[in-house]
Amino acid sequence: GNSVTQMEGPVTLSEEAFLTINCTYTATGYPSLFWYVQYPGEGLQLLLKATKADDKGSNKGFEATYRKETTSFHLEKGSVQVSDSAVYFCALTTDSWGKLQFGAGTQVVVTP
Amino acid sequence: AAGVIQSPRHLIKEKRETATLKCYPIPRHDTVYWYQQGPGQDPQFLISFYEKMQSDKGSIPDRFSAQQFSDYHSELNMSSLELGDSALYFCASSSGLAGGKETQYFGPGTRLLVL
């Protein structure tokens, strides 16, 4: 079956530091890959996505590249802000009906 | 832009009671998904509907049922509630045009507490 593995958190960073959250996956077929962000007490917001190999998704300074050869979709941001403190979920779907398979989530804490 | 609406936002129930959660998808979205997120857990897929028909089923207990109505809103009915049902329940909607790989947009969730 499909699975998503994310690096464990919490990840604690100072403001303006570089952020990387590793995500690897196992999937049958050709998955679409997503990063969702969950701010404290809120729902899930789509951060970025990629639907085929070598695609790069980007949004709000975050980037992730779909690497088929390493089955990875690592999330990066060059300079984090306190407002980036949240839980980040990597997810995939291969299903014709689209259900998402999530990773365990990585909590990011950015301090001033 | 209009987003996914869920009601109620918070719900407190006693064990063995029933609960109904409602989801109103983004206009013109024909696909609805339900997910359950336990404390400190990742969201788990429960069930989905496309054009008012059940399209997929995940780890949904037999005590739960759901349906999608003619206006595309969906309701998740939960009976004989157990303490372990306490969780955040998300609804997501998408347009089913891309064979399931369209982006899912999530609502704010309903936080259910079973006492």
Image: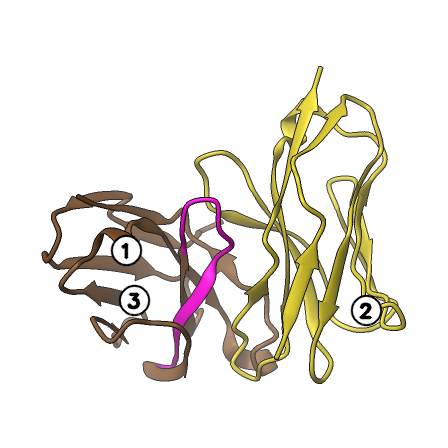
Q: How is the image coloured?
A: by chain
Residue at position x 25%, y 65% from top? B76
Residue B52 colored in magenta in the image: no
Q: Position of A62 compared to A92: left or right?
A: right
How far is disc 1 from disc 3 in space, using C-alphas? 22 Å
Residue B85, numbered circle: 1
Query: Circle 2 is placed at which residue position?
Result: A71
Mark 2, secondary structure of its residue: loop
Q: Earlier in the sequence, mark 1 or mark 3?
A: 3
Residue B73, numbered circle: 3
* Magenta span of residues: B37-51
Between A54 and B46, the one lying in front of the other is B46
Between B79 and A57, the one lying in front of the other is B79
Residue A39 on image: x %, y %: 54, 37
Chain A: colour as depicted:
yellow
Q: Residue flagged by tag 1: what amino acid is it?
A: Asp
Q: Residue flagged by tag 3: what amino acid is it?
A: His
Marks 3/2 same chain: no
Residue at position x 17%, y 58% from top? B81
